[in-house]
Image (tube, grey):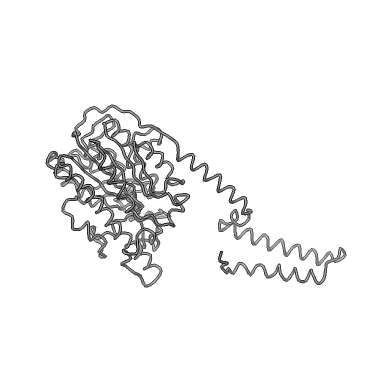
Amino acid sequence: MDLKFSFWLLILIPYLILFILTYKNPPTVSNSKKKSYAIIFLALVAIIFISENVINGRFARKGVPQIANVTYSFFERMILYKEAMQERLPKKIEINSNGTSNQQTFVLIIGESCSRRHMSIYGSKRITNPKLSKRKDIFKYTDVVSPYSTTLNSVLTIISNADLENRIDFDKSIDLIDVFHSAGFKTYWISNQSPIGIWDNLITILAKKSDYSKFVNISSNSSFEATYNSSYDSKLFNPFKTVLNENVDKKFIIIHLMGNHSSYSKRYPSDFNVFEGKNSKEETIAEYDNSMLYNDFIVDSLFNILKSNTTLHNNTISSAIYLSDHGENVYDINDRAGHDYANEMPQVNVEIPFLVWLSPSYMHNNATKTETIKININQPYVTDDLFHAIMDLNGIQCAYFKEEKSIFNEKFNNSRLRILEDGMDYDAK
């Protein structure tokens, strides 16, 4: 273990001097004045030490014995693990009409911390999307925002009937796994996010409702620790191919990427270390853009894997959506990086990519729907209504479906105010 110097170590000098003086001249009971001064001095030093650590939020870490910290951490991990391992079954709901085909696959690709401001297909000057920009088979939506700037809240609202106006508790909501399971689809969840941690436990519980769940990022003890380790999204390719090749007629697959999560430099292999910076700030931006370049490769590859599988089974109707859970501010606003709202909401924290891929058989069998999808690419949208859009895209109708909340529907309500998590109107900014 390395010992790093800190100017706070200088606080030990008075203690060392007192120790030497005391050793040479042991205090006597009669020398009460010097003794009082020494006690007062030591008390002041202790007060300064405690106060400084309390103000900076380090008192528990520095003041509590290490064995106590380790014990607390162990029991905290155990509680998180037990919570994440809870078993829940899909809710059975009535599907009023089912317009799905005999062979149908839908894939939802959820990215992480991806800001469209750093994507060249959305106008970024750096070429961060050399592969996606060449595709002629995707629909790029230009004005989509996430409801929250955090993964947990965003993902739970993306795939459930909870939204910013209707904040239903997780236990009481209906989610897409419930819907697709009731519609006769086999459900899958493949993730490169860590399954354990305060950020991910509820998502893991949701994932485990699927018929099949696979977590490939299990080398870290928690989601927080995973942000400092590498687990490249290419690890998702083989599990994705495996489930696509299963002899199942109807499939609903969610793929959860590690995407562009900080630490940015841990999100891509060395082959994608293309951009560089001259200072710390520029280097951070370069690392984020490198992660964008790698993410371009990942999303393009996932589309190609699905396309190849659909071609192999030429009568399969397939579709896919790629979006990010939220955006990321990488020195775009307020001279800082991250996705916290802080005192002022940077728009970049919620500005996300939204791409739709449709197979030729889907477009042939759903010509009217495809035309609506094409027409609506510039409509304003918040992804807390994606629950309805995905049902619409897949021809599923039930009591929970609202056509005015689907951006893929002719009756889509484009006048909804985009009031986000902090109560502010996104479009008024």
175 relative to 28 in the view: left or right:
left
Does residue 346 appear anywhere in the picture?
A: no
103 relative to 236 in the view: left or right:
left
Q: Is residue 94 above or below residue 126?
A: above
Provide residue 64's location: percent of width, then percent of height.
Answer: 63, 53
Provide residue 169's location: percent of width, then percent of height.
Answer: 40, 36
Residue 398 occupies which quadrant of the picture? top left
Q: Which of the pair 19/312 is nearer the observer?
A: 312
Q: Which of the pair 139/384 is nearer the observer?
A: 139
Residue 167 occupies which quadrant of the picture? top left
Residue 261 occupies which quadrant of the picture? bottom left
Residue at 25 percent of width and 65 percent of height: 125
Quadrant assignment for the N terminus: bottom right
Q: Is residue 39 above or below residue 403?
A: below
Residue at 44 percent of width and 50 percent of height: 223
Q: Which of the pair 240/51 is nearer the observer?
A: 240
Q: Is residue 166 above or below residue 43?
A: above
Does residue 399 appear anywhere in the picture?
A: yes
Q: Is residue 341 above or below residue 18?
A: above
Provide residue 21's location: percent of width, then percent of height.
Answer: 78, 71
Provide residue 333's location: percent of width, then percent of height.
Answer: 36, 61
Count of number-bearing discs: 0
Residue at 74 percent of width and 69 percent of height: 18
